[in-house]
Amino acid sequence: MTYRVNPNSGDKVSLLGFGMMRLPTMATGTARENSDAPIDQDAVNELVDYALAHGVNYFDTSPVYCQGHSEEATGIALSRHPRSSYFIATKLSNFSDAAWPRKESQAMFERSLNYLRTDYVDYLLLHSIGGSARGKDAFETFNARYMDNGILDWLVEQKQKGRIRNLGFSYHGDVRIFDMLLKWHDEGKYHWDFVQIQLNYLDWHYAKRNNPRNTNASYLYDELAKRGIPGVIMEPLLGGRLAKQPTHILKEMKRADINATPAEWAFRYAGTPEKILTVLSGMTYMEHLKENCCTYSPLRPITAEEDALLMHLADEICNLNAIPCTACNYCMPCPYGLNIPAIFSHYNNMLTEDHVPAKRWLNGYNRAVPKERQADHCIGCDHCIPHCPQRIHIPEEMQKIDNLVEQLKQS
């Protein structure tokens, strides 16, 4: 396993980090997609055991992952091993205004320690700064979550007491919030030991082309690197989108490396920049964990020629006009019962398959998404919009997909 050293704490961190966001359940699929299915703790234990045995030592969770059960499952699995053999990252995920009061945010942190069966957190993140709550802009939302209640200063106190070893934040949304927090770092107002950003070969230069409201990963990484702040990477596969490619793109990848999978290309790219501390992967299945461990044992950095190829392929992928959904499920549940990630996933799958007959696509759509949860049931309530880290205007996309379905029915 390739390791990177956090200059702020001296931690020797595995380049592959285990994202505990898509844990296996007793039913087919993941815990977030099957809200009624309990987590398969035996399977989680097996994954964690394999990961630790093969050098993975960074485990990232949150109070909101897996319908609120990720921290508990993570704590059960990890507590079976020496505490010194792994690093735990969790978040203050006080998204709801009900969690904004100081006591409620403090209680969330205390519950995290309890569920994780530990008396300290190695890496604590302000979760997804830059987003906007309903009726508030990004600055009002950030202040309500962390400043007006004094909770950020309280977290600094917890770090001084040793209950938090590294303090940082994860970023999605308004880049002005990202810039403000780095300005605070420069001024010595707050010190960030690490920052979590979205980085992959598509978002490096094309995040804004995909969605003008997004920020290119190249800007985010460079701002961290010049300050010496280690970067933790999320979405190296864009929720799995980069693991499945159209035939013509796959052929170009195979010409460059006949044995490499699309996922391997993406993980090598995400791990190549030197200031990256770890790259997170939400691994539900053992085969994905094994492949990712191999990719980083050790890392083969992307060469200049390979980088040029991936930038060329990123341009082609952008031209597919896929919906930039990463299946994080933050938009769920929909008040009107839509399965938003499943609808987007099926639509994007159509773009990666060559010449899919209309009837076959419709049949697959009906199998993948029950009729009562399809795009035509969207009423445009906008409840989902503030929750989307990718800043997708979900009702507009639902209308586009519904129009496509109607056209295909008539073709």
Image (cartoon, helix red, strand yellow):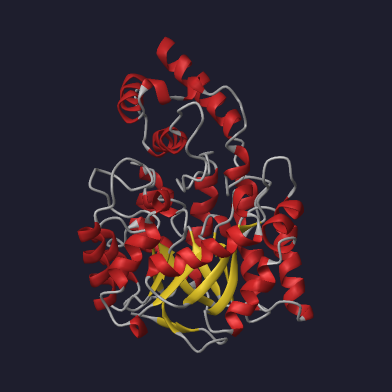
- Is 357 or 393 nearer to us in this picture? 393
Q: Looking at the image, which residue sits at the far right?
A: 187
Q: Residue placed at 46% from the left, 63% from the top? A: 111
Residue at image location 40% in from the left, 75% down from the top: 118
Q: Position of residue 144 (x, y in %)?
A: 71, 55
Measured along the vertical axis of the image, is residue 398 above or below residue 265? above
Residue 410 drawn above or below residue 163 = above
Q: Taking 57 as reference, is 215 above or below it?
A: above
Q: Residue furthest front?
A: 103
Residue 212 point in image, percent of width and height: 68, 46
Rendering quarter of residue 85: bottom left
Q: Residue at x 24, y 43 (%)?
A: 27
Q: Residue furthest top?
A: 410
Q: Position of residue 178 (x, y in %)?
A: 70, 63
On-image quarter of the C terminus: top left
Given residues 63 and 323, the one toward you in this image is 63
Whether residue 37 is visible, yes or no, is yes
The reply to whether residue 306 is in sight is no
249, above or below 371, in the image: below
Which picture quadrant has residue 175?
bottom right
Residue at coordinates 48% horizontally, 24% vertically from top-left?
375
| Quadrant of the rendering where the N terminus is positioned | bottom left
- Left or right, 102 with reference to 38: right
